[in-house]
Image (cartoon, grey):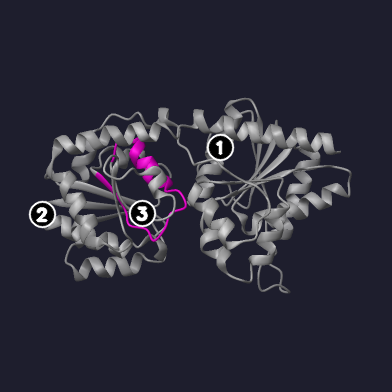
Amino acid sequence: MNIGMVCFPTYGGSGVVATELGIALANKGHKVHFMSYSQPFRLNLFSENLFYHEFNVNDYPLFDYQPYESVLASKIVDVAIYEQLDILHVHYAIPHASVAYMAQQILKSKKINLPYVTTLHGTDITLVGRDPAFEPVIRFSLNHSNAITSVSESLKKDTLKTFKIDNKITVIPNFINIKEYNLVRDESIKRKYAPNGEKLLVHISNFRKVKRVKDLIHIFNKVKNKFAAKLILVGDGPEKPSIELLCRQLNITHDVIFLGKIADPKEILSVSDLFLLPSETESFGLSALEAMAMKVPVISTNGGGLPEVNIDGKTGFLSDLGNVDEMAKQAIKLLSDQKLLNQFRENAFNQAKKFDIDKILPQYEKLYKQIIKKEQVSV
């Protein structure tokens, strides 16, 4: 198949999933054409089946805001015509689903039929999508998608509750390539961050309010009162200044390590003892899955799709939003019992294997083929 792939190129989960999916499809022999305003940060592998089509959104004195959607639609039309795309897969409903519909209609005027799949990733529905200003456009473009997928059952339910969607939504969960997570735990790396044998806790996110990173700091502070511990924060975002201030107020600055954005955090995860994710909600919890694939148990909230990934009392623990005391208590419980921690490590890895790309990729391939076949019959 000749597949067009549209995603945001940034560090969010939607970009990661889109990129890894495209790479996996290319490895299976499909030709995958990425379209974005900059190269997706994980799209750094050479492959004869991978192509990247960049488009530029120029500043014009007339516009207060750059015409991103129009330029992207034009790029989709151009790539579809000259690369003879069979199908288009857009990640994140806003604005990519409506852009895909626009491109589809332009192509129809040229007697070209390009079906598109929209994958919902989370905040495009649960946060941004709740803005009434977006509702008519989102509902229209989703109802006109040739297929819709969501990354969890929870997100599917949220979408159906928020919008009047007549279209079917197929759940295809996020995934990891389990073979890439077979790293040996290198104690010399851990000593760089925990030189005195401290417990090592880690969190990865884009530091937005929805991630509740202040809760994370309070959880860590309670754990630190019980054990010598270090906290590694991977990522960056608008909440970072307030997090730094809170660390100073609690006098734990020297025990909290900010590493910034890291494209591939596997090495850090491989030496971690626990992964903390106190988010307000997660449509799926890809960072938790990546931690589990490295045999790191997860302490998280129970919102959104997290219970579909992190199994309470087996791969980690789930708590209600804002219950810092309970999350700290569960973390201390695991860190106090090495035998229990080791069991949770193995459980986490076994759960992660259920989301291996080899199990998920065929679901996308099957969906693509069904849509292409259906469209060919209808022409």
Q: Which amino acid does label 3 sit on?
A: Asn
Q: Residues within 10 Å of mark 1 (few under 14, many from 20)?
A: many
Q: Name the residue under label 1.
A: 21
What's drawn in magenta, residue-wise? 274-296
Q: Which amino acid does label 2 sit on?
A: Lys
Residue 20 can be seen, yes or no: yes
Magenta highlight on residue 57: no
Element at label 1: helix
Task: Locate residue 215 relative to residue 46 in the image: left or right.
Answer: left
> Residue 35 at x, y = what percent?
66, 46
Q: Name the residue under label 3.
A: 302
> Residue 235 at x, y = what percent?
38, 54
The image quadrant of residue 225 is bottom left
Which quadrant, please, contains the N terminus?
Answer: top right
Q: Name the residue under label 2.
A: 226
Up the image or down, 118 lies above or below 46; here it is below
The residue depicted at 72 percent of the width and 57 percent of the height is 71
Q: How crowded is mark 3: few (under 14 residues within 10 Å), some or many (20 or more)?
A: many
- Contact, mark 3 vs mark 1 (Cβ under 8 Å): no
Residue 72 can be seen, yes or no: no
Q: Residue 82 carries which label?
A: none
Which quadrant, please, contains the C terminus?
Answer: top right
Q: Which of marks 3 and 1 is nearer the N terminus?
A: 1
Q: What residue type is labelled 1?
A: Leu
Q: How far apart are marks 3 and 2 (CA)?
A: 25 Å
Element at label 2: loop
Q: How far apart are marks 3 and 1 (CA)?
A: 27 Å
Up the image or down, 232 lies above or below 139; here it is above
| Count of numbered badges drawn on the protein | 3
Q: Earlier in the sequence, mark 1 or mark 2?
A: 1
Q: Nearer the viewer, mark 3 or mark 2?
A: 3
> Residue 301 at x, y = what percent?
33, 55
